Amino acid sequence: AQTVTQSQPEMSVQEAETVTLSCTYDTSESDYYLFWYKQPPSRQMILVIRQEAYKQQNATENRFSVNFQKAAKSFSLKISDSQLGDAAMYFCALKTSYDKVIFGPGTSLSVIP
Amino acid sequence: DAGVTQSPTHLIKTRGQQVTLRCSPKSGHDTVSWYQQALGQGPQFIFQYYEEEERQRGNFPDRFSGHQFPNYSSELNVNALLLGDSALYLCASSYSDRANTEAFFGQGTRLTVV
């Protein structure tokens, strides 16, 4: 079975500071993909960043970057220079091949002005 | 490109009734997945449709059924509604032949069962 765990139900960060959201996962597959999705109050699930398991280099998208530790099955998200618009629920997600996406329980991020 | 569209946005039903939710995938996408997201939780996979057939199914009862049409749009049907079916229902579309692409989500249908 595939699982995704997010151990931080809530996090807060001061505007312009850096915050790291944690995620661990479990899968027996060797080929899989990891995602971080953002869900603001508008409910729209928005892709923040993705990582292919076969790539050793950590993915980066502007202020967002990941720390992918394949052996430890860890996939954390770092948000730099946090902005008020970053406040949302963040979901870590795992997808193997053509399989369904498995989501973690989410982390609620607050940004303090 | 309109992205993934879902209708209706909100719905209130009475316990025991039946409901149908609709989803139009992003242009070019041929696979549609449905998720149930209870308040404060992550989305839970219900099922996935490809080529008008259910390809995968999560741990949901047979009261949950679906359909995919030739134009790739999809419906989710829930029979004999229970109070516990109250949730946000998300539809996601993707390409079948690109395993590494992310799913694109609609804004969801908020179902309230009273």
Image: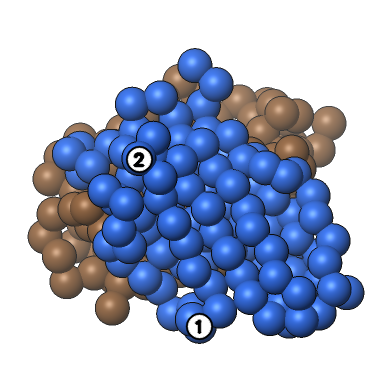
Chain colours: A brown, B blue
The amino acid type found where label 1 is placed reads Pro
Q: Nearer the viewer, residue B112 or B40?
A: B112
Q: In the rendered view of the protein, which quadrant contains the C terminus of chain A? A: top right
Q: Nearer the viewer, residue B48 or A14?
A: B48
Residue B60: x, y in percent?
49, 78
Few, some or many residues within 10 Å of mark 2 (<14, 14–19, 20+): few
Q: Nearer the viewer, residue B108 or A107?
A: B108
Q: Chain of mark 1?
A: B
Q: Work out whether B72 lies above or below A104.
A: above
Residue A27 located left or right of residue B52: left
Residue A73: x, y in percent?
27, 63
Residue B68 located left or right of residue B19: left
In percent of the image, x 15 and y 65: which residue is there?
A: A29
Q: Is residue A97 visible?
A: yes
For marks 1 and 2 on the same chain, the one whose residue lies earlier in the sequence: 1
For label 1, the SS is loop
Few, some or many residues within 10 Å of mark 1 (<14, 14–19, 20+): few
Q: Which residue is mark 2?
A: B70
Q: Residue furthest top?
A: B1
Q: Chain of mark 2?
A: B
Residue B13: x, y in percent?
82, 67
Q: Quadrant of residue B67?
A: bottom left
Q: Which residue is mark 1?
A: B61
Q: Nearer the viewer, residue B53 or B91?
A: B53
